[in-house]
Amino acid sequence: MQDKKALQEEKLKQEEKYMWAIVDGVKEKVGNFRVEPPGLFRGRGEHPKLGKLKRRIRPSDVTINIGKDAPIPECPIPGESWKEVRHDNMVTWLAFWNDPINQKLFKYVFLSPSSSLKGQSDKEKYEKARMLKDYIGNIRAAYTKDFTSKDGAKRQIAVATYLIDKLALRAGNEKEDDEADTVGCCTLKVENVQAIAPNSLEFNFLGKDSIRYENTVEVEVPVYKAIIQFQAGKRGNDDLFDKLDTSKLNAHLKELMPGLTAKVFRTYNASITLDNILNKETREGDVSEKLVVYQHANKEVAIICNHQRTVSKSHDAQMSKLMEKIGGLQGTLKELKTDLDRVRKGKPPLEDANGKRKRNLTPEALEKKIANTTEKIEKMEADMRTKEDLKTVALGTSKTNYLDPRITVAWCKRHEVPLEKIFNKFLLEKFAWAMDVDFDFRF
C-alpha cells in the first residue's frame, strides 16, 4: 500500500510541471496533457478503422503554442524536437497533433475546464442560448410559413430547422469512406425516416459516437407531407435533403440570429426543459424527494439529446441487494407492529429470531420505530424506481455540456438542496463561475 502511495507521489512530482500554464500573469491549470500510448484502435460502433494500429506520437508530431517571450519547454525525449512552436494569442489551445488514425482530425491540449478562460467561454455559450429565447418565436413562425414554400430548397431548410429545434438533432456532416457512418439532420438518408399515417415520423439512424437514434414522433402535418415529397422517387440510400448541406443550413441559421447553430438549439432546448420542469414540479419536502424531481428533469433532457448508455453490469446485483434489504425491513416492520399491538393489550413482546426476550418498549417508542422503518422502506423503494428508470439514460453528458449550471445552482439555493448532491467535484470546479448566481435566476 505504501509502495503504491510512493509511486503516486513520484508520478505527481514528475507531472507537476506539465499541469500548469501562466496566462496573462495568472497561474491556470492545464486540462488533459497526456498523449495516448500506441495500441489498437477501438473506436465506437462499427467503425471502418476498428483494429488499426495507433502509432506512437513523438515530439516531432506536436505543435506547441506559447507566448513570444516565454522560454520553449524542454523536449522530454533527448535528441528530438517539437514539430513547431507558435505564438498565437487568438486561439485557446496549448498544443496539438494529428490524430494517428484519421489525419484530418486533431488532438488538442487546452486549459482545464475550471480555468477562467474556459469558464468565460462556457458563460458566453449559455448566454447565447438564452438569447435564443428572444428570437425563437419569430424563428418558429418563419419556418412554419416555409413548410409549404414552392421553393424546394427553402422548404428543405424549413423542415430541417424544425427537426433540429423539435428533436435536438445535430446538423451532421458528410462522411468519408474511412469514417464511421454516423448521421445528422442534413445527412439523413431516405431509409432513416419512415412516414407513419396520419402524421408521425419514425427515425432510425446511427448518431454521434455511433449511438443509435430511434424515435417515433408526431409532427406537424405540413412537415409530414414535405418528408413524403422529399422521399418521392428516391432510393433508400439517397439523401433526404438533397438541396441542403451543413454549410447552407448554418448560413441560414446565422441569418435568423447572430451565432445561431444547431448546437445552440440543443443547449437552449435542454436548458429551457430543465428550467421549466424544475419550476413546475418541485414541491416542499425533504431533499431526497427534490432530488427525484431533479433526476426526472435531467432524464427528460437526456432523452431529448439522445444521451444513452448500456445497462451497467452491476445493475441486477444492485437491485437484488436493495430487494433483500427491503425484505428485511418489511420483516422488522411486521414484528414492530405485532409488538405494538401486544403492548397495547398489556402483553409482553414476542421473542426475537434467536429466541431471546425483547426489551419492553412504550407504545410511543414502538410507533417511532415503525415510522422510521417505514420511511427507510419508502426511500429504498424510491431508489429502486429511480435506478430502474435511469438505467439506460446517461445524465452526465447533458449536465456537463448542455444545461446552464446557473439553473441548477439557483434551484438548489431556492429549495435548500446541497449542490454537492447534484454536481460532482469536477463540475463544481468547472462551473465555479456560476456559483454566485441569484436564487431567483431563471433561464
Image (tube, rainbow, N blue to C red):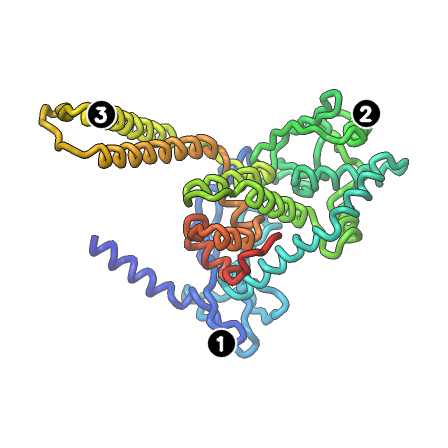
- In the rendered image, which quarter is residue 180 located in? top right
Determine which residue is flagged by label 1: 71
Residue 223 percent across, percent down from the top left? 78, 31
Which of 62/189 is in front? 189
- Label disc, if present, on residue 335 of the rendered structure: 3
On screen, 32 above or below 368? below
What amino acid is labelled 2 in the image?
Ala
What amino acid is labelled 3 in the image?
Glu
Q: Earlier in the sequence, mark 1 or mark 3?
A: 1
Q: Is residue 425 visible?
A: yes
Residue 226 percent across, percent down from the top left? 81, 30
Residue 135 percent across, percent down from the top left? 75, 51
Determine which residue is flagged by label 2: 232
Task: Look at the numbered disc 2 and give the secondary structure of its residue.
Answer: loop
Which of 132/419 is in front? 419
Residue 293 percent across, percent down from the top left? 50, 40
- In the rendered image, which quarter is residue 123 located in? bottom right
**Classed neighbour count for the residue bearing mark 1: other residues with Cα under 10 Å, few (<14), some (14–19), many (≥20):** few
Task: Give me the C-alpha separation between circle 2 and circle 3.
Answer: 70 Å
Q: Residue at x 46, y 39 (%)?
A: 292
